Every structure is written in C-alpha cells, then in structure tokens.
Amino acid sequence: MLKGEDPTPAEDSRRDTILRLAKRRFMTEGYAGARMEPIAREAGVSTATLYGYFPGKAELFSAVIDDASRDFARQMDQVRITGADAHQQLTAFARAYAQFMGDPFVRAVFRLVMAESQRFQSVAQGFFERGRADFGGVLIAALKTLCDRGELKIDQPSWAAGQLMGMIEHPAFCVPLFVGDVALRRSLDDIADDAVQTFLARYGV
C-alpha cells in the first residue's frame, strides 16, 4: 500500500490478522519475548510486509493495545440505558459491566498493559483513560437522567458512578487480577445485583 492511499479490504483483513496474532504473542510471551518474525510467519506474510504495516515492535504493541481499547469500547456500546426504572437500568449496566470485567481476556490485556506501563507510559495512560470514559460515561449519563426523573438523589453523579463500578470491579476484576484466575465465590450476576442493591439503598428515593 502506498503512503496516502486508503487500505483495501484485503489489506484491512491482513492487518486485523496481524494484530490478533500479535496480541496473543504479547499476552503469552510478554513484550520482551515476542518477536516480529514469528508473528509475520504465523500471519502468512513476509517480514517486510509486517514492517510495512508496523515499523517496529513498539509500534505493533501500541497498535495492539489501541485495537483492544476499541474492542472494549464496542462491547460497552452495546450497553445502552433504556427507559426502564432505576433498578432495571442499573442492573442491566451492572451485569454487562461485571461480565466485561470478569472476562479472563480483559484481565490478560490489563496485565499486559500494566507490565509495560513504564516502557509505554503514554499508551498505558491512554488505555486506562479511554476505558474510564467509555464505561463511566454511559453510567454517569444514566444516573443524571434517573436523578432528573426523581428516582435517585445524587449530588455528584461521577462519584456515585465510581462507587457502583468499584463494587463490581473489586470482586470481579481486582481479586482475580492479583491472585490469579480462580473461581469466584459469587456469580458475576450476583456480584452485579448485590452492587445495585447496595447502591439503591444509598441513593434511591
């Protein structure tokens, strides 16, 4: 592909394949262990073609994390708050968020970003900030609407959103992140439902 030209569907597909395989290599081997040549070979392209897409391993790693971030945003885009009551809306969000945060793949990507945060500080910072905006934005907007409807009483929707998300993140994400992918004591739906019940006990009208 010449510089300045739009990629063809075949080129887009090839790039997506490279990113998918590189993501797996980085996650299993780490940044230092992953090498460009095996990634190119597994993707069925020449090393020259791979370097045509990504000038070096640092650029490939940054693209992998950016692609994962966009994928996470697409998942959260499916969580749209409807006109249901506060309990139904918050439960829908909380269960979707718990399923996302409890996904072993999500934890694997976070581990990878954390491990390379010093080497790729701006990439890691952008990844986390984008995640907060994608996830928190949906919830904050819903909380403001529910307050306007008189179903909740919240002075700081952003703080309240952080509290609800935190009640889900700790058991569904943080504990498995640091102690390993062990079986949860509660199901993800139970974690979400308990968080919503506690939240409504505090902020419900």
Image (cartoon, helix red, strand yellow):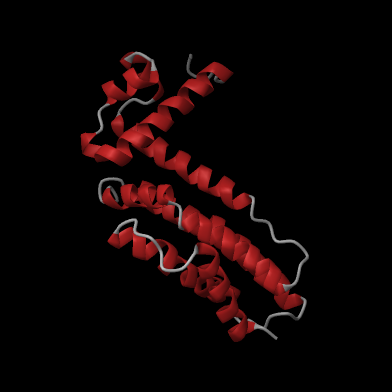
**Which of the 4 image quarters holds residue 160?**
bottom right
Q: Is residue 202 visible?
A: yes
Q: Is residue 176 above or below residue 15?
A: below
Q: Is residue 50 above or below residue 83?
A: above
- Seen as rendered, the residue at the extreme left is 32
Which residue is found at the position 28% from the left and 25% from the top? Answer: 36
How many numbered marks appear?
0
Q: Nearer the viewer, residue 67 or 178?
A: 178
Measured from the top left, where is residue 66 in percent x and y? 45, 41
Measured from the top left, where is residue 13 in percent x and y? 52, 22
Measured from the top left, where is residue 55 in percent x and y? 33, 25
Q: Is residue 8 visible?
A: no
Measured from the top left, where is residue 52 in percent x and y? 38, 19
- Report the side of 26 relative to 204 (left or right): left
Which residue is found at the position 49% from the left and 64% from the top? Answer: 187
Point out the image quarter for the C terminus: bottom right
**Which of the 4 image quarters holds residue 29?**
top left
Q: Is residue 102 above or below residue 145?
A: above
- Report the side of 145 relative to 5 (left or right): right
Which residue is found at the position 34% from the left and 56% from the top? Answer: 181
